[in-house]
């Protein structure tokens, strides 16, 4: 047993050594690669934090709705609060890379679809990445399903165009996009250009008449009103519905009554009982904020606004969007870069997916070996593997047929939800909420509702399955 644990720790060191070697060799070749290495090392940190805290949005709401355990929700809100705090400093200093997204009812609908999908698959987008680092075969299927769904959905038209309202079609054509973007022949293109882009980008600072970059806007508007107050309200709801039961029961036995002060004590105990997850959330939130600062600093150093310019200077301009850009968020993000992997492969196999908005106008499909966000996702898996190996929690797990089916179905729904909501549980909820984007809470509310529906469906499915098995045994 000790020998096996020692081997796993050696493998953990090998992974760290490999990433260090990649950073050193590529930087020695050209100092522009430090930009990609920044994504790599932050991805490594995210993977380690996620695995250490067992940090998964699907698990959070599944545990809450199914068995009443609030641990993971507390961790998520802790990470959100700390990311909000750090990002407020970054925003006020003028180094933020965040851009708010259009907000509307579509954000909530997208979150609903995504929430159902993450419960079905047993892992959210980020959770599936870190579980893949633990050797989980189901998680790999989830990642593949999300990626293929997004990549395909981005370019589908045909019969789907019959579902496009005439107002979307007309509005999309009026945007005068470059001729290479066939905006009138794709459902998602017309949804984006003809509907989503017509919605305003709204932050809590703007709602209060403040500038996002000002100290008052960053701290009073986006942090206090947009993050702290709603996060504490959510935690209070979690405490009074799920968290207080055991605490109040024990208190009534000893005191016979419960005061408001007792509830504050119980609330704080709920926070502390989630120590490991909350600690992971603390480091995750701080790292997310620091990444924005670092990436913006590197952009200033190299005199660029997007990694597409770096790839051009390196002589690798294949797969750049019509605007010369690639997906380069500047902060933690998942799903889009995984869709780019599939999009790049499909393009090489003959599927022209550079005539749509998602790839051709915004994100591009650069070589995965030179895609900054790809480096972040791969190193996230590596970081999770390191932590799992160090804690003797790494184990290859082959999926059963039933789990594989749920993984593919759940990944499909998450892929659709991600494209409709312009992001997943990280990009459309965690990052947006932490930066004061109103749309983040809309996606989050939808995601919570979807998770509730998913849990209720699984309860029904399990009871039905057990009833059939019992009936078969009686026969």
Image: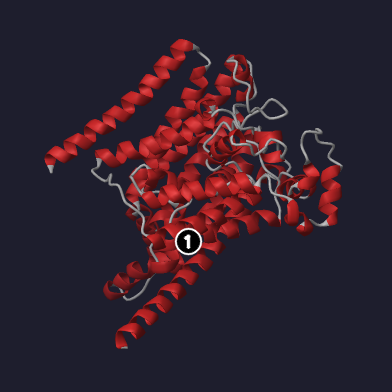
Farthest residue in the bottom direction? 475
Quick one: 267 or 300, which is closer to the camera? Answer: 300
Residue 475, quarter of the rendered image: bottom left
Quick one: 88 or 130, which is closer to the camera? Answer: 130
Give the left or right position of residue 109, taking residue 331 as reference. right
Which residue carries the number 1 mark? 120
Q: Residue at horizontal 32%, vertical 24%?
A: 17
Quadrant containing the N terminus is top left
Circle 1 crowding by C-alpha within 10 Å: few under 14, some 14–19, many from 20? many
Residue 47, quarter of the rendered image: top left
Farthest residue in the front direction? 350
Structure colour scheme: secondary structure
Across and down, in percent, residue 313 comes to 61, 14
Examine the rendering and report whether any part of residue 442 can be seen.
Answer: yes
Q: Residue at horizontal 19%, vertical 35%?
A: 7
Across and down, in percent, residue 101 comes to 67, 43
Q: Residue at horizontal 77%, vertical 54%?
A: 161
Location of residue 457 with respect to 411 vertically, above or below: below
Q: Residue at horizontal 80%, vertical 32%?
A: 178
Location of residue 52 with respect to 108 vertically, above or below: above
Q: Secondary structure at mark 1?
A: helix
């Amino acid at each position: 047993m000790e020998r096996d644990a020692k081997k796993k720790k050696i493998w953990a060191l090998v992974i760290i050594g490999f990433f260090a070697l990649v950073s050193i060799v590529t930087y020695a070749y050209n100092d522009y690669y430090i930009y990609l290495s920044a994504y790599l090392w932050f991805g490594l940190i995210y993977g380690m934090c996620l695995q250490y805290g067992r940090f998964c949005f699907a698990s959070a709401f599944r545990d809450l709705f199914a068995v009443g355990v609030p641990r993971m929700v507390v961790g998520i809100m802790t990470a959100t609060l700390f990311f909000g705090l750090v990002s407020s400093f970054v925003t006020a200093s003028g180094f933020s890379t965040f851009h708010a997204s259009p907000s509307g009812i579509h954000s909530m609908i997208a979150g609903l679809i995504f929430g159902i999908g993450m419960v079905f698959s047993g892992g959210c987008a980020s959770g599936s990445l870190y579980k893949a680092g633990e050797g989980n075969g189901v998680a790999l299927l989830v990642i593949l399903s999300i990626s293929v769904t997004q990549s395909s959905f981005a370019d589908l038209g045909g019969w789907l165009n019959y579902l496009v309202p005439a107002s979307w079609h007309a509005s999309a054509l009026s945007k005068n996009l470059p001729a290479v973007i066939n905006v009138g022949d794709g459902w998602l293109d017309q949804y984006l250009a003809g509907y989503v882009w017509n919605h305003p980008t709204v932050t809590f600072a703007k709602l209060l008449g403040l500038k996002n970059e000002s100290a008052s806007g960053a701290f009073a508007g986006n942090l206090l009103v947009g993050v702290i107050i709603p996060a504490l309200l959510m935690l209070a709801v979690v405490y009074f519905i799920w968290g207080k039961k055991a605490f109040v029961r024990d208190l009534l036995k000893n005191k016979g009554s419960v005061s408001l002060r007792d509830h504050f004590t119980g609330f704080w105990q709920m926070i502390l009982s989630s120590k490991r997850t909350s600690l992971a959330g603390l480091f995750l939130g701080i790292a997310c904020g620091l990444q924005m600062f670092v990436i913006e600093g590197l952009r200033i150093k190299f005199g660029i606004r997007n990694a597409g310019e770096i790839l051009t200077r390196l002589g690798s301009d294949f797969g750049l969007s019509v605007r010369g850009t690639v997906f380069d968020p500047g902060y933690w993000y998942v799903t889009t870069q995984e869709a780019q992997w599939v999009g790049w492969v499909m393009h090489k196999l003959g599927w022209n997916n550079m005539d749509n908005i998602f790839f051709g106008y915004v994100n591009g499909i650069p070589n995965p070996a030179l895609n900054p966000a790809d480096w972040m996702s791969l190193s996230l898996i590596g970081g999770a593997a390191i932590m799992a190996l160090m804690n003797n929690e790494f184990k290859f797990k082959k999926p059963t047929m039933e789990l594989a089916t749920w993984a593919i179905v759940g990944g499909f729904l998450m892929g659709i939800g991600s494209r409709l909501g312009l992001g997943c549980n990280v990009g459309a909820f965690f990052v947006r909420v932490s930066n004061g984007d109103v749309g983040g809470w809309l996606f989050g509310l939808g995601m919570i509702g979807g998770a509730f529906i998913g849990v209720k469906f699984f309860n029904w499915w399990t009871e039905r399955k057990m009833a059939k098995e019992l009936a078969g045994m009686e026969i």
